Amino acid sequence: MLAKLDQLYAESLGKLEAAGETAVLETWYKNTLGTKGNIQLMTRQFGKIPREERPAFGQRINTVKSELEAAYQQKLHLLKTAEMNAAIASSAIDVTLPGRQQPQGGLHVITQTLRHIYRIFGDMGFQIYRTGDVETDLYNFELLNFPPHHPAREMQDSFYTTDPDVILRTHTSAGQIRAMQEYHPEPVRVILPGMCYRNEQITTRSSIQFTQVEGLAVGTNITFSDLKGTLTEFARRLFGADRETRFRASYFPFTEPSAEMDVTCFLCDGKGCQVCKQTGWLEILGSGMVHPTVLRNGGYDPDVYTGFAFGMGPERIAMLKYGINDIRQFWNNDLRFLKQF
Ligand code: DAH
């Protein structure tokens, strides 16, 4: 019986040695030291052995049990450590690897241009005044002194809604009246940025959708000199300190007198090139003294108040500044184009 116990002991130790993972170890324990394990079964043989051999056998079996238990604990610790090390190694982060690049967004070139314009007028005390993209015929045309049969009112220029009096604004000038009606009788000094819409043929130079920045100053002491001074300073800050400006007489229904402002071409410095069509000048914006009728429609007495207004297209300004030759580029969402700015 003792010999059988020693053989079982040797076999069990051998199997324990051979176990390569903790799962195998668990099975080994169940089969060896568990309640129905081999060693336990052997203990139950106790009654079958001769009385005088019992003490020796009992002692031996206790030694075997505690030695196997100790060997098991040692092996368990060994395998657990090895398994943990393997897990750590396989999920390790190599901190020396270069990081993954996160794509970085940027501001649209028109947003950049708008913000540049806001900054300049902000420094001069102009506030930003926003009005809706959807306007009424009244504000977009009528109160701005558009004669009833002015060509801009015709269907091909405006986008109409199912209500013939409601349109998409064709210019930011529509907000002038709204600003005046809100401010009067206080002085006004605002710029009105926004998207404008015209039902036109799309070409490299004109789009059905574009931004504008309108300006409006109304007060009791505003002259054409203020208009010229403000816009000349604006042009210098936007295009460069040595830009010269000139004002050409023009016509807009809502201003009288009206003028368009040119700046000396900043590509050829006024010498003449393709962009300025050899004239040395670039047209930048429309402007004028607010028409008395428009002042009155805004709630101001034209005998007491005067004002100037102007309007410009940031797309045109950006096209000139960066040499972009197709206005459609701005809203095509082609990242190769947009990422250049
Ligand atoms: N609204 C005009 C346009 O869309 C631009 C403009 C011209 C605005 C003269 C003005 C102005 O305020 O005084 O072409």
Image: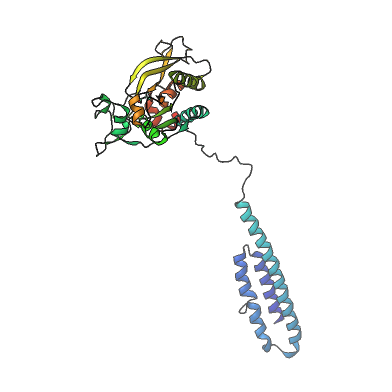
Q: Quadrant of ligand 1?
A: top left
The furthest residue to the bottom:
51
Comparing 195 with 150, the one in front is: 150
Residue 303 percent location from the top left of the image: 38, 24
Q: Is residue 15 left or right of residue 198?
A: right
| Residue 266 versus residue 72 in the image, above or below | above
> Which quadrant of the structure image shows residue 200?
top left
x then y, percent, for residue 294: 34, 27
Residue furthest out toward the front: 303
Q: Is residue 22 left or right of residue 220?
A: right
Quarter in which the N terminus is drawn:
bottom right
* Horizontal side, residue 54 vs residue 143: left or right: right
> Residue 131 at what x, y percent from top left?
39, 36
Instruction: Compare residues 188 and 59 and report the one nearer the observer.
Output: 188
Which residue is pictured at 66% across the width and 58% down the height?
Answer: 82
Give the x, y percent position of residue 164: 24, 36
**Residue in the picture at 42% in, 31% down:** 192
Q: Nearer the viewer, residue 262 or 38?
A: 262
Q: Is residue 191 above or below residue 41?
A: above
